[in-house]
Amino acid sequence: MSSSDSSQGHVSAVSERLAKTKSEGRAALVGYLPVGYPDVDGSIEAMVTMVKAGVDIVEIGLPYTDPLMDGPVIQTAATGALAAGVHVRDVFRAAEAVAAAGAACEVMTYWNPVLRYGVDAFARDLAAAGCSGLITPDLVPDEAADWIEASAAHDLDRVFLVAPSSTPERLVTTTAACRGFVYAASLMGVTGARAQVDSEAAKLVQRVRAVSDIPACVGLGVSTAEQAREVAGYADGVIVGSALVATLVDADDRQAGLSALARKAESLADGVRG
Amino acid sequence: MSQTTPPLGRFGAYGGRYVPEALVAALEELDEHRRKASADPSFVGELSELHRSYTGRPSIITPVHRFGDEHCGGAQVVLKREDLNHTGSHKINNVLGQALLTKRMGKTRVIAETGAGQHGVATATAAALMGLDCTVYMGRVDTERQALNVARMQLLGAEVVPVDHGSRTLKDAVNEAFRDWVANVGHTHYVLGTVTGPYPFPEMVRDFHRIIGVEARAQMLDAYGRLPDAVLACVGGGSNAMGIFHRFIDDPDVRLIGLEGGGDGPDSGRHASRFSGQASPGVLHGAFTYVLQDDEGQTIESHSVSAGLDYPSVGPEHSFLRDSGRAEYLPVTDTEAMSAFQALSRTEGILPAIESAHALAGAMNLGRELGRDALLLVNLSGRGDKDVHTAAQWFGLLDEKDTQI
């Protein structure tokens, strides 16, 4: 229903992937990992491992010093990545590698690193790297005039978040501003595994469906195959972050981390296939 | 839409609302309530009564002749005594307002961030007074530096949560408070302690502190028959400065001077001088404003002997006043601030907060420049009792074994 978009004809790799999984009668598995943890090469290897294990779309995190939407696991990885010297430009390298491995990707970033890089320059380099667009946890459409312009100019997705607290009016305006998909936050809270997926999640997806035909992917708190299966029952995509990152954070060494990551991703991939 | 001044909550280019969508509804609810409250005689009356019978307002002004003669080139220096407020600083003005709003919104719990502990103590105080649950986030490093203030908050019934992420100081306490708020926003209000954060906080917190300048301007006219040549205040996030500046903004002959934590000096890399060429406009904690950041937009940690000024960002209205030239901002090094601390203590018998000592150091420099005819108003935003340990260490009054209080 975002018919006001000037570049309506463009279809991103992520959109194509979501259409394909839908035609297969299943939800997509969206896997988050931050670039630069444990180091840049290690993180890229992990992303490729995750793709081989069945992740459809990679959400590449750009580590930031003040990640106020993230829980302890992702904070630990982001802090580790920054300490290991990750740079903003590494996100473009990771995007190229993910595309080469056959998955689509979005970059998940807090707003200040993009602002500092230059909004249009960031959009240009992201598009050149073959990435579909951005997920922006601390940028709401109200403040996103520059980004809406740059993303239109470079044919990029704009993934804004909606939450159980979003008013009906904001659900309409936010989904209208999105391209690619809308990120439905399953609960009021930060990233991290939860014992159960909040019942608010299904309600929120229902509310999105009532006002928009944009695909809805659900994130926050999904960590097991069981939960992925449950969410795949009503959402277009299942976003898993902390549970994947934890396999790397908790591992004794790199190889063990990659093996644990592959096992976790395979199990989640089974989950979204019902 | 009742809003007629687009874009929402901006001071020139600065401000805005850079937050997760999950918080937008709560920010709009807060904005609606504080607008209604500011026009509601029962709210205004209740807050005025608390100012009078709980905080001890109006706070007096005190001429400090010996300090002016001996340290400020003979200039006439007048202190606005926010240090005499209940809980010992200006922070109580904002906290009482927000606590009353919390009750009006039907919420039962408040959370706050704190650096030195002054805002945390003020919030714990208001929560005790109004029967609200209270959780205060404080960087682990600060809980160790300010152990007595941790105990104070606990004695008042608040839970103090040490924050172990990032630099483990004020900025990380703010992050953690936001995380709590996202998860508990249904029944919790975040009592943000300064004039930054997402709209409406910068405007609302300023308005709750505006009474400082309103009182001081009238008191100056009453006592001296004229306005001061300059108003000086320290600037961390900048709440006491906005509070005293705001009533003087339309008085073009009154210079407004903000003093920042200069740490080891602007070229040392260890400072909190956002306006000395080291910071640039960016987003931190929900606002577009000057931020100490590296080339990639990562926040750089600040340093100051004063925990209350040790913050890498600053309220967006200060960024606007700085760019427009209406206010000036100057760094004061740790050493200059501690000299001013000692000077006021010994000439006037008033122990200032180390934060406020930065404003006093600004007055010392300006007074020497302007001489005897100058009339300077300094916001003494807090008292120094909380800083006795830090100051005693600085001046070598403690044995090593005593430094582990």
Image (cartoon, rainbow, N blue to C red):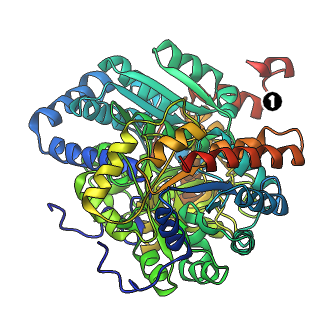
Q: Is residue A107 above or below residue A126?
A: above
- Image location (x, y in percent) of residue A232: 48, 48
Q: Is residue A160 visible?
A: yes
Task: Give the tally of numbered discs.
Answer: 1
Q: Residues within 10 Å of mark 1 (few under 14, many from 20)?
A: few
Which image quadrant for residue B260?
A: bottom right
Which residue is at 70% across, 44% downward?
A: A264
Which residue is at 69% across, 65% downward?
A: B294
Q: Is residue B63 visible?
A: no
Q: Is residue B155 above or below residue B339?
A: above
Decide which of B89, B44 is in the foreground and name it: B44
Which image quadrant for residue A144?
A: bottom left
Decide which of A215, B349 is in the foreground and name it: A215
Give the side of residue B237 with respect to residue A8, left or right: right
Secondary-structure class at tag 1: loop
- Image location (x, y in percent) of residue A149: 43, 82
Give the side of residue B300 with respect to residue A30, left or right: right
Which residue is at 37% across, 55% downward?
A: B245
Could you tell me which quadrant the N terminus of chain A lies in? bottom left
- Image location (x, y in percent) of residue B179: 51, 40
Q: Is residue B330 above or below residue B59?
A: below
Give the side of residue A151 with respect to residue B273, left or right: left
Which residue is at 57% across, 30% downward?
A: B384
Q: Amino acid at mark 1?
A: Gly
Look at mark 1 in the image and give the residue it sits on.
B396
- Image location (x, y in percent) of residue A158: 46, 70
- The subunit carrying tag 1 is B
Give the side of residue B2 with respect to residue A209, left or right: left
